Image (cartoon, rainbow, N blue to C red):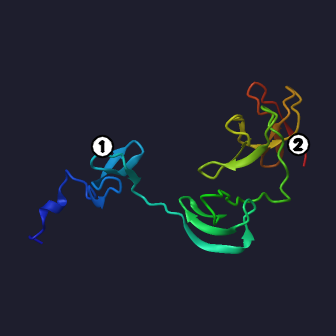
Amino acid sequence: MSKIDQSLFSANQHALEKEYEVCPQCGSELVIRNSKSGPFLGCASYPKCDFIRSLAQHDNHQIKVLEDSPCPVCGNPLVVKNGRYGMFIGCTDYPNCHYIAHDEPEPNQEALPTCPKCEKGQLVARSNKFGKTFYSCNSYPSCKYTLNFKPVAHTCPACQWPVMMQKQMTNSVVLQCPQKSCSHKFTVEQ
């Protein structure tokens, strides 16, 4: 163990500091740079050359072409792809057609009321990054109305707001007004 090369354990240089790739724009060496978003590969001759690339390669690659499923937008076959955020179904004619299949709502799922704030959009169920469900207007970003509990089309008897929140308690269901100035609530018999 006495023949360890001490230059491998240098504390003043990152292990991946030297990237032995060449810049496709100017032919200089690519080096690791840091920004507020994290590390990335950049050209060593910056600012003459402004080439950058992320360290992690997130290539969309096709897994299986679904020959019997045509794209509803352009008619080309759909394909199962593995992308940056996981697997999804998209069109094989990608640069020309940007269709991505989304999960369809279940037919027995009851419809949510219209947005009481803008009165144009529909309230839809969404989930945050932790998986918790919340309800917001589908005309976001023009309308930023959100609720943490399931909205019900029931007029508040105190302030006449057209939507109330349904809270499931241990033994009962409570409807509460989402307006902070009102917060009227009452129990509903099941």
Q: Position of residue 136 (x, y in %)?
A: 72, 41
Count of numbered badges drawn on the protein: 2
Q: Is residue 134 above or below residue 97?
A: above
Where, quadrant-wise, is the N terminus in this rendering?
bottom left
Does residue 29 appear to the left or right of 113 in the view shown? left
Toward the viewer: 112 or 93?
A: 93
Quadrant of residue 116 within the rendered picture = top right
Does residue 41 appear to the left or right of 90 in the view shown? left
Foreground mark, 1 or 2, reads: 1
The kind of secondary structure element at disc 2 is: strand
- Few, some or many C-alpha atoms within 10 Å of disc 1 (few <14, some 14-19, many ≥20)? few
Does residue 113 appear to the left or right of 52 in the view shown? right
Toward the viewer: 14 or 93?
A: 93
Residue type marked 2: Val
**N-terminal-most mark, 1 or 2:** 1
Q: Position of residue 40 (x, y in %)?
A: 37, 51
**Residue 188: mark:** 2
Q: Is residue 152 above or below residue 96?
A: above
Q: Which residue is mark 1?
A: 48
Residue at the image position 35 percent from the left and 53 percent from the top: 25
